[in-house]
Image (tube, rainbow, N blue to C red):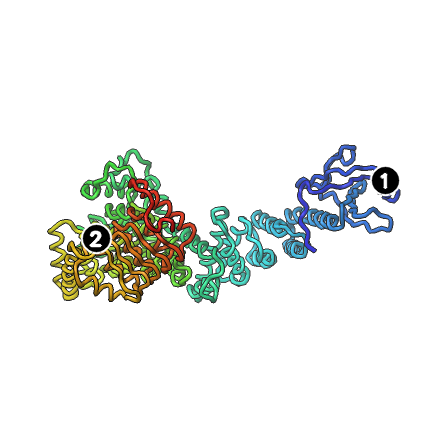
Amino acid sequence: MRYKLLQEGDIQVCVIRHPRTFLSKILTSKFLRRWEPHHLTLADNSVASATPTGYMENSISYSAIEDVQLLSWENAPKYCLQLTIPGGTVLLQAANSYLRDQWFHSLQWKKKIYKYKKVLSNPSRWEVVLKEIRTLVDMALTSPLQDDSIHQAPLEIVSKLLSENNNLTTQDHESIIVAIAPLLENNHPPPDLCEFFCKHCRERPRSMVVIEVFTPVVQRILKHNMDFGKCPRLRLFTQEYILALNELNAGMEVVKKFIHSMHGPTGQCPHPRVLPNLVAVCLAAIYSCYEEFINSRDNSPSLKEIRNGCQQQCDRKPNLPLRLLHTSPDLVSQEATLTESRLKPVIVTSNEIHVEVERNNTTNQKMTANVGNDSEPNLIDCLMVSPTCSTMSIELSTQADRILGCFVEILKMLSDYDDWRPALASLLQPIPFPKEALAHEKFTKELKYVIQRFAEDPRQEVHSCLLSVRAGKDGWFQLYSPGGVACDDDGELFASMVHILMGSCYKTKKFLLSLAENKLGPCMLLALRGNQTMVEILCLMLEYNIIDNNDTQLQIISTLESTDVGKRMYEQLCDRQRELKELQRKGGPTRLTLPSKSTDADLARLLSSGSFGNLENLSLAFTNVTSACAEHLIKLPSLKQLNLWSTQFGDAGLRLLSEHLTMLQVLNLCETPVTDAGLLALSSMKSLCSLNMNSTKLSADTYEDLKVFLVLSQVYSGREVAGPGAESW
């Protein structure tokens, strides 16, 4: 049977104190009935406090208890405990046998734990200490008490013992670790013990203790830890353990097997905390590699000062030297004669870097037009504005370089698991790395594999994380695009990211507009080299009238006509534009209903047969049209009512409609396969008055969100929600 550990204030008992010589005379029911139950208070080192009758005026310490027994005599009172103390005996009477046994085991455990604290606080012979530790562990494992402190208290005793004795041999260390290993199977090690484990991993990474004892401990930490911020030494211990695995002969293969064991053999990891904990360990380890440089820039210009111009150097405290490889003007001038000097590292102080940043800012005033803006400039711009940050090469120590390589490789491994990739992309979307890491060519080159895995994933929740978290902030898309500090190719990764984002982004116009404003040059360059994705982008810019400047439009057309693929796609664009003008020419019917079983091809053939500039009401109910027909529907400028009842029209089509059909007022989506992802896009349709979503996969939360968005849009536009189907909200 399992019992809860006795806590302070838990006992309501009859308390009797008497000399041992009169024990047999007072153990009668008549005598016990004379005493009312009193509250027995447990302090940290006592079992009982004073009672109002004068008995037990002083508390009894656990160390003073000589013996604890259950009374089992023939005429003994029921449910009593006998505590033997110097000069007398204390009887405790419980209400039932379970409560009595709980007191009995709790008092025994408390008494023994204080005994071990005293014995292990002054160790004399380590063989005796080791024996006592094993006995202590056995006591904790066999105790019928069920409480966290039953296993934690022995670990804290051993932790204190190790922290106060630094002269132990390596053999003593391993013997103690093996002795307490059973307690670590279901308990996190305390902070001091984590520090001891870290030291052992650093000093003896090839020890069998690391594999046999530490592996289940780290696995438990990764599976069950909820917040490394509350116990950072757990994270540090996990980091040192992984580095110890990397020191083995197989190196990263051992680490890879460990990561696979944490994920499990199935396609879905059963432990949701493993990935966030592994990412937290990786981020902290990578940060530690650049900590020296981060500390040395504590008094350096902030990102805002780099953009707007640094303050005077005399206002700053002197900084620590930075260990950087920086091009020296003297070495450049002597390049013809001193070729060996070009490879020599130059120690550049922080002050020199600040002067260089300030000088470059004065020569790049056009790039810093927002001088009066108090908002913090984005990270990518700061790295690009300051050639000092973007051109310098950070030289890491051998140890830091080894740590960086190990944990970046782990991030690569994590990105290879399909079920982990969405959460990993979300965790890395805010770019949680110091700017020194982003200016380090080796780091960005190695991390490129992870970003490429995101760009290749067809799931929107993955590749959408390539974009920034919010407006005004840069994301991985900007960092690895041509002109970004991490771009080391001719734009292949950039083209791959644009291709996947264009395929899923329902705000196509907004995305194209951002490309036209910031990345038009790289897009034209890649299109000139025959990249089909960029050719499509330029054609879409012309088709959606993204470019207003005539000269820029002519330059885009010239770029398209310079390659075979561009010329072919531009001709197709011209044909579509002529058809569009004919389609949108005023005239034709105002209402149109397609026969049932019609397809996307039938709709396209019908719309290409004449002018439909006056079409306001289109019914495609009970047809076989899909989201593909949205490309034709968005060309109807006067469309106000659209009936898609019982069609295969899905989320992709809804996203396209929400961006182009700004005049739409009535939309029937009853019995269509649309989901929350597509329905949320309708919140941008300010003219929508009636929306039927019966028999769809609409959730309650999305229903409430849509209701708020669309009702508010009608209130702000001065209209009420009305019209056919308004009751279908």
Residue under the image location 16 percent in, 54 percent down: 586
- Would residue 463 be found to the left or right of residue 124 on screen? left
Looking at the rendered image, the disc whose residue lies closer to the viewer, 2 or 1, is 2
Determine the CA span between mark 2 and mark 1: 101 Å
Q: How many marks?
A: 2
Residue 622 figure quarter: bottom left
Of the pair 598 and 539, the residue shown nearer to us:
598
Q: Which residue is mark 1?
A: 31
Residue 353 figure quarter: top left
Image quadrant in which the N terminus is located? bottom right
Vertical relation: 120 (above or below) 247: above
Q: Amino acid at mark 1?
A: Phe
Q: Position of residue 403 (x, y in %)?
A: 40, 56
Question: Do we see residue 451 in this rendering?
Answer: no
Residue 626 figure quarter: bottom left
Q: Position of residue 255 (x, y in %)?
A: 44, 62
What is the number of the mark on residue 236?
none
Question: Do we see residue 308 in this rendering?
Answer: yes
Q: Position of residue 67 (x, y in %)?
A: 77, 48
Q: Amino acid at mark 2?
A: Pro
